[in-house]
Image (cartoon, rainbow, N blue to C red):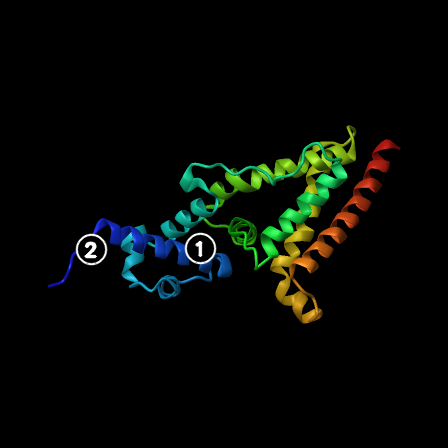
Amino acid sequence: MKMKNTASDNLKTREKILSAAVDVFVKHGFNNTTIREICQEAGVNVAAVNYHFGGKDNLYVAVCKHVLGLSGNVELRGFDIDQTAPPEEQLRLFIRSLLFAILDHKKPSHEGRIMAWEMVHPTGSLDTIIKDMIRPRHEQLCAIVGALLGPGADVPLIKSTVFSIVGQCIHYRHGRPVITQLHPKQKYDPDAIEKLAEHITRFSLGGIKALAREIEE
């Protein structure tokens, strides 16, 4: 006699699908992921996704909420940075945190990689990603850059500078296939990420200081 699925069985299946979906979506992004691939990873029938989530779109929304901590009613803020540190140090910590969030595979930051995918291939979940992750971090970096540029800096200059800093970091995520072809010895281990963070910080501070001098003239 075939046993009926219990509520506990349904919950376990749902959790298996969600866990597998997080890994696959983070790795391949929404557009390059199939339901079949997720189900193979989870070890469930392809019909289970529709039964538990109502399709790929709804599953992705659930994944976004899960990695953002919204399933536990926790609203993410900016990176954990010492607000009493000099702005130069805050910039270094921000860049380091962002790079580790999107590049370090040994210490995966699912929210960082989902954010990176949404920035180049936005989906219907982009509003949630912006509200609960990108905007808080964007505002955090704007405050740091504003302090570095000085009181004479206007909003457009701060915004452009912030986008330039983030662009350097995101390039190493989405430009990785090309970077690897051009420079096969390029590494992405923790030591390499630390060195990359230092370089982007020094490069960015150099540009910011030049802009600050122009403002004062």
Mark 2 = which residue? 5
- Asked if residue 54 shows in the view, the reply is no
Q: Is residue 25 above or below residue 206?
A: below
Label 2: which secondary element: loop
Identify the residue at horizontal 59%, vertical 53% (top origin): 102
Q: Earlier along the polypeptide chain: callout 2 or callout 1?
A: 2
Q: Mark 2 vs mark 1: give the one in front.
A: 2
Q: How far across and down, in percent of the image, does residue 41 sit?
A: 39, 64
In this rendering, position of residue 8 left or right of residue 43: left
Query: Residue 6 appears at what percent x and percent y?
Result: 20, 52
Identify the residue shown where x is 54% and y is 52%: 109
The kind of residue on which mark 1 rests is: Val
Number of numbered discs:
2
Q: Farthest residue in the left direction? A: 1
At a point 69% along the width and 42% down the height, the residue shown is 162
Q: Residues within 10 Å of mark 2 (few under 14, many from 20)?
A: few
Q: Quadrant of residue 182?
A: bottom right
Q: Could you say where residue 110 lies in the image, as x and y percent from the top left?
A: 51, 52
- In the drawing, does residue 182 fall left or right of residue 57? right
Q: CA distance from mark 2 to mark 1?
A: 24 Å
Q: Residue furthest right?
A: 217
Please name the residue that numbered disc 1 is placed on: 22
Quarter holding the C terminus is top right
Quarter of the image with the N terminus is bottom left
Q: Nearer the viewer, residue 86 or 29?
A: 86
Name the element at disc 1: helix
Look at the picture and state if 210 lies above or below 46.
above
Towards the viewer: 63 or 124: 63
The three-letter code of the residue at mark 2 reads Asn
